[in-house]
Image (spheres, rainbow, N blue to C red):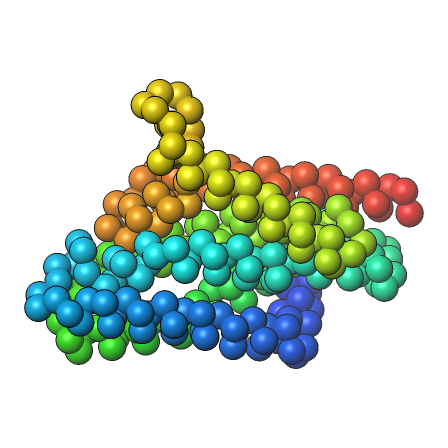
Amino acid sequence: MTGFFAVLKRELLSLWVTPLAWVLLFAFLMLQGTSFYLIVDHFSKFANPGIDAGPVQAYFSSLFIPVTLLILCPALTMRLFAEERRSGTIELLLTAPVSASSVVWGKYVATVVTYALIWCPTVLYVFILRNTGDVEWPIVGSSYLGLLLVGSCYLAVGTLASALTKSQIVALMLTVLCLFGLFILGIGERVFDPGLGLEICRHVSILSQLEDFSKGVVDSRRIFFDLSLGLLALFICIRTVDGWRQEA
């Protein structure tokens, strides 16, 4: 992993020095703030909502979360390789003493770190709810674990999509299409009759994943799916970058 930290530092600087991360942070907090307000307003009409059906679970399992990920993850990853290939700066990385795996992992981890930092302010929502009732922190922890796992998987798909094109817009659209396809496949759990098709759709459904994690249910099968899909995407991406170096 020669040069991993150099690439990581370079990508973090490029994300936070430019307006991209700040614009995404602003849009993200506006969307999440609206979601949080609507959910709290709804539950304020109930006297004693339980944790299993209260605002904490409702927030982390709401439809706002998948919609947010369908926007946030492609936007974070679209420029990783596409912009470097368009501007020609990728040649500097290909000729530097940095392995392909370091380049891919450095760029990918930078987006995961940025993704996690963007979610950090939402912890304040939980502290606000703590002042109105009891909050079970293990459930909050499992909810954020679910967000990190699903987000990391989606970011890996976006990293691969960015390596397949020289256009940021095309990379954005490819990632959105792939993630939306997974989302639609997951909706099949509400359509299919009991059987293999239903089980497959339930297994990949982001709605079911987030709902389980928001209840404190950490299913190893879901963790395995997210990690497997993410690692597969990164493996293909590393092979793609290796191919560029051999052609150069």
Tell me if 159 is positioned left or right of 122 in this view: right
Residue 159 in percent (x, y) is at: 65, 51
**Residue 45: quarter of image:** bottom left
Asked if residue 101 can be seen in this view, the reply is no
- In the picture shown, does residue 21 fall above or below 4? below
**Residue 76: quarter of image:** bottom right
Which residue occupies the foreground of this view, 237 or 54?
Answer: 54
Which residue occupies the foreground of this view, 245 or 47?
Answer: 47
Residue 55 in percent (x, y) is at: 23, 64
Tell me if 45 is positioned left or right of 204 in this view: left
Residue 173 in percent (x, y) is at: 67, 52
Question: Which residue occupies the extreme right position in the image?
Answer: 248
Which residue occupies the foreground of this view, 24 or 185?
Answer: 185
Residue 141 in percent (x, y) is at: 29, 59
Tell me if 199 is positioned left or right of 185 in this view: left
Residue drawn at point x = 85 percent, y = 64 percent: 87
Tell me if 147 is positioned left or right of 48 in this view: right
